[in-house]
Image (tube, rainbow, N blue to C red):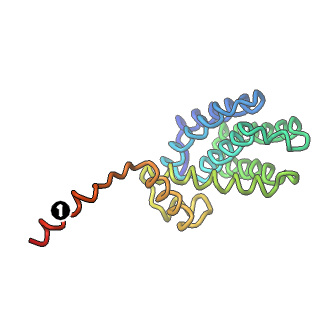
């Protein structure tokens, strides 16, 4: 689906704020920006918005946990990452969605290529994908479609969604006397 003009403006602003938050190492803003992209991802179901959401969320976790300190040349990494986001912004401005998605994929590859944290980043990225996938699913996309857009399995996504739902629900149990009384009433 092609991204509409008003949504392009939203994405551009979001990417600009993400670049600034990365420079300032502000994990709260990064996490908020990631949540905002879920709306775009649900409306337009484009891989670029979904990938941006996961990327920004992953970076928020790296900054929040101060794991960015383990990345060699963090400042150089951020310059490269932000320059790729600049290219993505230019592609959006010229209404070239395929180039936009290409640059977003380049940003993803750059993040995943950090050798000193490669496995850790892969794990965080996978968890971020599942986390964002659950939010997209909550917005009404099917489990199958959400998993396909994120490149994850339906099983992983449904397991996380079920666990999240179970943790957030407040299960109340009856005491033994009430259960016994209810059973007696049922069988009489």
Q: Quadrant of residue 29?
A: top right
Rendered residue at 64%/54% (across/down): 127
Q: Picture quarter containing residue 61?
A: top right
Q: Quadrant of residue 68?
A: top right
Q: Mark 1: few, some, or many residues within 10 Å (few <14, many ≥20)?
A: few
In the picture, measured across the screen, residue 163 lies left or right of residue 79, that is left
In the displayed orientation, state which residue is furthest to the left. Answer: 188
List x then y, in percent, for residue 32: 59, 34
Q: Residue at x 66, y 57 (%)?
A: 126
The residue under the point 78% across, 53% down is 112
Residue at horizontal 60 percent and vertical 40 percent from the top: 34
Residue 23 image point, x, y percent: 78, 29
Horizontal and vertical percent position of residue 131: 57, 51
Quadrant occupied by the C terminus: bottom left
| Residue toward you, 25 or 53 | 25
Q: Which residue is mark 1?
A: 182
């Amino acid at each position: 689906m092609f991204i509409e003009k008003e949504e392009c403006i939203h994405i551009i602003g979001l990417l600009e704020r993400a670049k600034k938050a990365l420079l300032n190492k502000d994990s709260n803003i990064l996490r908020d920006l990631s949540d905002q992209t879920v709306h775009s991802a649900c409306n337009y179901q484009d891989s670029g918005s979904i990938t941006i959401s996961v990327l920004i969320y992953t970076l928020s976790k790296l900054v929040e946990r101060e794991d960015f300190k383990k990345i060699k040349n963090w400042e150089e990494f951020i310059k490269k990452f932000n320059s790729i986001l600049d290219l993505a912004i230019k592609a959006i401005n010229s209404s070239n969605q395929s180039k936009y998605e290409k640059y977003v994929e380049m940003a993803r590859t750059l993040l995943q290529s950090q050798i000193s944290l490669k496995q850790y980043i892969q794990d965080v990225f996978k968890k971020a994908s599942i986390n964002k996938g659950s939010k997209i699913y909550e917005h009404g996309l099917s489990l199958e479609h959400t998993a396909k857009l994120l490149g994850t399995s339906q099983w992983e996504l449904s397991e996380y969604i079920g666990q999240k739902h179970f943790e957030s629900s407040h299960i109340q149990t009856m005491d033994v006397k009430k259960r016994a009384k209810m059973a007696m009433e049922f069988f009489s």
